[in-house]
Image (cartoon, rainbow, N blue to C red):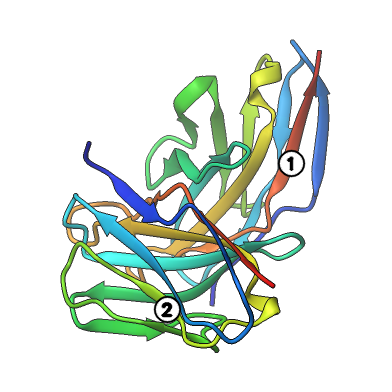
Amino acid sequence: AQSVAQPEDQVNVAEGNPLTVKCTYSVSGNPYLFWYVQYPNRGLQFLLKYITGDNLVKGSYGFEAEFNKSQTSFHLKKPSALVSDSALYFCAVRDYGGSYIPTFGRGTSLIVHP
Amino acid sequence: DAGITQSPRYKITETGRQVTLMCHQTWSHSYMFWYRQDLGHGLRLIYYSAAADITDKGEVPDGYVVSRSKTENFPLTLESATRSQTSVYFCASTEALSGTGELFFGEGSRLTVL
């Protein structure tokens, strides 16, 4: 079985400050991990993924995520937040070698204040 | 333009009526998915399809029917709409054979059942 937890429903950060959106996961084997972003009235857009290799993954719009196997975490980060980063962020996981059906977290609303 | 398109984007219907939401993708991706998004529930998988003529139930399939006679199309039908099916519906696709499983989403179909 696979599962994802996003422990924060909402994250507030001031523009220019670093941001972190948290995600922890559980899989029986090795994980494929994903972050998606959803802007209002839009579909989800793929941001970045961890498959294997370097634990720090860089993605679109200046976002990055750090894979930590011992803590089973995959937190999304950005060094300097923009107001335009305000959106809903979803973490997802699927088991390498397993089903192609990912499991999504419930989403975290990021609000960046001017 | 290549991509994944959903229609209609907005639909209002009445309880008991049949409604079909359309999904079309131009990538020839093998996997296609239908999700519903509701406040407090995140994304919930309704049905998915691994290939043409192969479909399977997700987490919340009751009251929905799908078909996939062609690889590029994956319509979702509500046979007798209920108010609890008021939601935003997202179609997604992914390539299983050559990809690492990130999903590509449509823009969503907002359905209101009166």
Q: Position of residue A109 (x, y in %)?
A: 74, 41
Q: Position of residue B37 (x, y in %)?
A: 62, 61
Q: Quadrant of the C terminus of chain B?
A: bottom right
Q: Position of residue A16 (x, y in %)?
A: 74, 10
Name the residue at 41% across, 60% down.
B91
Name the residue at 35% across, 64% down.
B22
Residue labelled with disc 2: B77
Under mark 2, the amino acid is: Thr
Using residue B3 as the reference point, say whether residue B11 is left or right of it. Answer: right
Observer-nearest of B33 and B2? B2
Observer-nearest of B78 and A95? B78
Using residue A7 as the reference point, say whether residue B18 is left or right of it. Answer: left
Neighbour tally class for label 2: few under 14, some 14-19, many 20 plus, Cα within 10 Å: some
- Dot label at residue A109: 1
Which picture quadrant has residue B57?
bottom left
- Tell me which chain the residue with mark 2 is part of: B
Using residue B40 as the reference point, say whether residue B113 is left or right of it. Answer: left
A31 up-or-down from B84: above or below: above
Q: Position of residue B50 (x, y in %)?
A: 26, 74
Under mark 1, the amino acid is: Ser
Using residue B26 as the reference point, say whether residue A70 is left or right of it. Answer: right
- Tell me which chain the residue with mark 1 is part of: A
Q: Quadrant of the N terminus of chain B?
A: top left
Name the residue at 39% across, 56% down.
B7
